[in-house]
Amino acid sequence: MADTTVTMDKIVSLAKRRGFVFQSSEIYGGLSGAWDYGPQGVELKNRIARFWWKEMTQLHDNIVGIDAAILMHPRVWEASGHVENFTDPLVDCKKCKARFRADQIPPENLAARKCPECGGELTETRKFNLMFKTTLGPVEDESGLVYLRPETAQGIYVNFKNVQQSNRMKIPFGIAQIGKAFRNEIVTKNFIFRTCEFEQMEMQFFVKPGTDEEWFEYWRDQRWNYYRKLGIDMNKLRWHRHGPDELAHYAKDAYDIEFEFPMGFKELEGVHNRSNYDLSRHQQYSGKDLQYIDQDNGNERYIPFIIETSAGLTRQLLMLLCDAYEEQKIADKGNEDDWRTVLHFHPEVAPVTVAVLPLMKKDGLAELAQDVRAELKEDFATDYDQAGAIGRRYRRQDEIGTPFCVTIDYQSKEDGTVTVRDRDTMMQERVPRSQLSSYIRAKIKNYKRPERIS
Ligand code: GAP
C-alpha cells in the first residue's frame, strides 16, 4: 500500500518538476529565504491575487484599491512602531555558529544557554530588527536611510486622506492592496511558508469607534467564507485567537486563520482590530490632521478604528498546493499508470484552464485541435499538447491541476463535437464545438470541490 500522505518534500519536488517554484539563484547554490515562481507558479499567483482582489473590491461596494511604493519615508516606520518593536529575540551558538530565534528553542536550552544542536554555549539573547535597510541617493550614510517595507498596511494608512477625499469615501470603507513585503527572517525553513521576500494581500477597513467589534465579527465571517469559495477543505482550517501575550502592540483583538500544512496548523491570515492606533500615530508623527469629518452627522470628527485582514499571497499559494495535492490510485494493472498525482485547484485559480489535445498528430487532427485552441484562448488560459500517449498527456495536465482537457478525435472531424474530460472525476462528455466556451464557463461557475477518493 503506497503512502499517499502529503509531505513538504513531495510538494517541493512537484513544484520544481512542474514549473511552479524554483530556488532563487539555484545555479549559484541558491539564496535562502528567496524563491522564483515559474510558468505555472506565476499564473497561479496572479490568479489567487485576482480572486482575492475581486472578492475584496468588486464584491464589496465600499472598498477601493491602491498600489503604494515599497520605499516610504523612514518616519513611517517610527510612527508605526516597527523601528522599536519589529524585532525577534536572537541567540547564536558560539561553537557551531547556528542561529536561533530564542522563542523557538526548548526553554531548558535557553535557561542553560546550551545549543539545541551541538550542546555548545549560546550567546546572550539580543533583539534583532527584521526590517531590511538600504540608502536612497548616492551617499551611503544615515541621512539616506530607507527601509524595504515589512508590510503593505502602512502604505494604506498614510494614504487614508488621499483616498477618502479623492473618491469621496464615507465611513465605513476599506482600502485594499497587494504587494511585496520584506522581512529579514531568521528561520526560513518549510519552503515558501516563511521567506524574506514575499507578497501580501491586505485590506484596511476604517470604521467609527464603537462599531469596531461588530465590523471585526463581520470581517472574520467574510474571510472564513472566502476560503470556502476558493474550494479549500474547510476541515483543514481553524481559528486561533491571540492571547494577551501574543497581541501586537497595536491590537485590541486578533484572530489568525490557520491551515493544516504538512508541518501542522500554521498561520495563514490575520484578522485584527487595530483600534485607532495607526492613524493616531501617523497624525502625531506627521503633524497632519487625519481625523474623519462625518458630514452626515453634524461634522462630527474622529480618528477611525481599523479592522485589518492581512493575508500572505505566497503563503496562500503554498496552502493551495498542499490542499489540492492528491495521489490517487485509478487502476490496478500493476504498473506506474495505476497512479496519478492530481492538483484539485478551483478552476478560477488553476494555471491552465483548458488543455487541447489531438488524439493523433496525423489525419488533420492536430490542425483541428490548433483551431479549437485558437478559438478558446480569447476566453481561457489554454495549453496544447500533442506529444505522447493520450493517457500520459492527461497525467501531465492533472499534475498542474488543469480542470478541463478537450480532446479532438476522428468523430470531431465528422460531426464537429469534441470530448471534455473533467480532471476530478476523469469523466468525459461529448460537446458540440459551438457550445464549448459556454459549457466550460458554466462548469467553472458551478464548480464544487470533489470528495477525496483516497
Ligand atoms: N499588517 C499586518 C501584518 O503584516 P503579519 O501577521 O505579520 O501581519 C500577515 O502578516 C500575513 O503575511 C501572515 O498571515 C502571512 O500569511 C504573511 N507573512 C508574514 N510574514 C511572512 C513571511 N516571512 N513569509 C511569507 N509570508 C509571510
Image (cartoon, grey):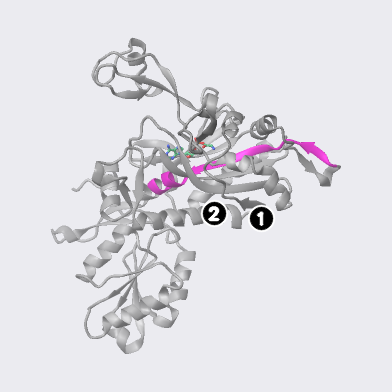
* Image position, residue 320 (x, y; %): 39, 50
Residue closest to the far right: 298
* Image position, residue 41 (x, y; %): 37, 54
Disc 2 + disc 1, Cβ < 8 Å: no
Q: Residues within 10 Å of mark 2 (few under 14, many from 20)?
A: many
Residue carrying label 1: 61
Residue at 28% from the left image edge and 56% from the top image edge: 18
Is residue 303 magenta-colored? yes
Residue closest to the far top: 112
* Image position, residue 359 (x, y; %): 25, 77
* Image position, residue 112 (x, y; %): 33, 10
Residue closest to the far front: 138
State whether label 2 is within 8 Å of ligand 1. Answer: no
Spatial separation of the CA atoms under disc 2 and disc 1? 13 Å
Residue carrying label 2: 53
Residue at 45% from the left image edge and 30% from the top image edge: 130
- Is residue 400 shown above or below 313? below
- Mark 2: which amino acid? Trp
Q: Disc 2 on helix, strand or loop? A: helix
Nearer-the-camera pick, 52 or 225:
52
- Mark 1: which amino acid? Asp
Q: Disc 1 on helix, strand or loop? A: loop
- Is residue 316 shown above or below 270? below
Q: Residues within 10 Å of mark 1 (few under 14, many from 20)?
A: few
Nearer-the-camera pick, 235 or 167:
167
Whether residue 243 is visible to the viewer of this picture, yes or no, is no
Q: Which residues are magenta?
A: 299-318
**Relative to residue 400, is residue 449 drawn left or right?**
right
Residue at 69% from the left image edge and 47% from the top image edge: 162
Is residue 195 magenta-colored? no
